[in-house]
Image (cartoon, rainbow, N blue to C red):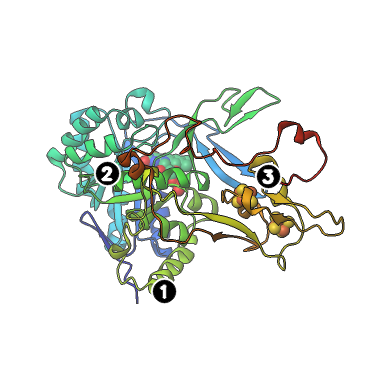
Amino acid sequence: MANLSVNFAGIKSPNPFWLASAPPTNSGYQIMKAFDAGWGGAVWKTLGVPVINVSSRYGALNYRDTRMMGFNNIELITDRPLKDNLREIEEVKKYFPNNAVIASLMVETREQWHQIVKDVENAGADGIELNFGCPHGMCERGMGSAVGQDPVVLQTIVSWVMEVAKIPVIVKLTPNISHIQDPANAAQAGGANAVSLINTIQSVINVDIDNFVPTPMVDGKSTNGGYCGPAVKPIALNMVKNVALEPGFKLPISGIGGVENWKDAVEFVLMGSSTVQVCTAAMHYGFGIIREITSGFERYMDEKGFKTVDEMVGKALPQTKHWEELNLKYKVVAEINEDKCIGCQLCYIACEDGAHQAIGLSSDADNRKPHIIEENCVGCNLCSLVCPVENCITMVRRDDGKQHLTWKERTEQGTIPTTFNDELAGGLHHWVPEPADALKNKTLQKN
Ligand SMILES: Cc1cc2nc3c(=O)[nH]c(=O)nc-3n(C[C@H](O)[C@H](O)[C@H](O)COP(=O)(O)O)c2cc1C
Ligand code: SF4
Ligand code: SF4
């Protein structure tokens, strides 16, 4: 049976699933409820300098039938008094000594950092997370993502914290930067014990086209906010991977961004996260989602034979390469399973207008099932992604599996094309229709 308990940079937790610092961790009441439901840890809503929050403050990207596929907020850190939060941290730890309570912090001066670190340690927090990620409001005051975007300042503040911290310190990184490895390295150089990522992505989520103002609207005005939710998962996974693969980077990573179910959590762990944090999904569906996350994750571990979470961490990283290391000799083409095909022709339209004109229609008007023109197919996957029937279009291998040649190897051999007319160029012999064929109302075929 899988063991879900983790020791993340010295912070012990019954499972790797933590609530991220956000509205679900605004109070002791919520965190007690969450722990009772099964969450292993919680990063307290960021404590720091006094702020005033606005109303309204959230916006959503609803996509077709899915509400809140993307989520955006212009909320700042906690507006509750520090002493109330400290008292509640203490109380939560009395009820749940084995769950991880991490205090998220954001202040300005060295003295303020020293003081607040001591305050949360005295309250019994198990760890500290430095919020260097908030991309709205706080950054304009020189905090949040303003720090996360400046590795030198980040390292300085981390070292201030490390001067006094007795409990593990996690640095939360902003994704609003082109090279996430720089602040991650700065966190390590400053002496941090771990990093977490991502915080929200700076965004304008919608524009009210009747009133000419972006949302969320505050008395007829708006501002950019922070984007999160399922839509940001690919960006978060990529950034986690970039940090995990950074040569010389040794700190554990807490992965955050769009996690909603057990499979999302597994993906973050396979890409190098030792714990996983959740915000939007808990705001959308409540703390009860932890039951599905835990049971699904546990079942996956059992099926794959993983005894501990640590065994899983980074399992997908050796297979994650730079483009130049991919095998150019590997060749797949699309194959349609006629028995499953419902004749919707979505694949035909997608390939015809958006790919390589490699799907043909029958001249028999009663037969709506398309066929692949294999010599035109570049194996891009588009039709299989568009097809609404599961496993109706599959990608089948056509190379013999014996040859391996990458761009990197070709560069080393001196066999990369140097002009478009070069015999070595990639698309030289690919068939495309004549431009005027676009005006003929008939299926494009090579011959
Ligand atoms: C309304 C809201 C408030 C947030 N407040 C904080 C905060 O106070 N401190 C912090 O570090 N992150 C804050 N976050 C960012 C989340 O902790 C998390 O990094 C981000 O939402 C990505 O995770 P998700 O896709 O699961 O929501 C906030 C996010 C939201 C939506
Ligand atoms: S894999 Fe790409 S090129 Fe091949 S048939 Fe499908 S959409 Fe067309
Ligand atoms: S998209 Fe799928 S189901 Fe629709 S015609 Fe193409 S193969 Fe058939």
Residue at left 56%, top 51%?
A: 379
CA separation in Å, label 2 and label 1:
30 Å
Left or right: residue 227 versus residue 169 is right
Disc 1 crowd rating (10 Å Cα; few below 14, some 14-19, many 20+) is few
Whether residue 26 is visible here, answered yes or no, is no
Q: Which residue is mark 1?
A: 303
10 Å crowding of disc 3: few (<14), some (14-19), many (20+) = many
The label nearer to you, 2 versus 1, is 2
Residue projecting furthest to the front: 423
Mark before the other along the chain sequence, 3 or 2 = 2
Question: Looking at the figure, which quarter contains the N terminus?
Answer: bottom left
- Kind of element beneath mark 1: helix
- Disc 2 crowd rating (10 Å Cα; few below 14, some 14-19, many 20+) is some
Report which residue position mark 3 lands on. 357
Residue at coordinates 38% horizontally, 49% vertically from top-left? 405
Q: Quadrant of residue 201?
A: top left
Q: Is residue 237 above or below residue 224?
A: below
Mark 2 highlights which residue?
A: 246
Can you give x and y, in whole percent of width and height, for residue 299 in the image?
43, 72
Reply above or below: 117 against 337: above
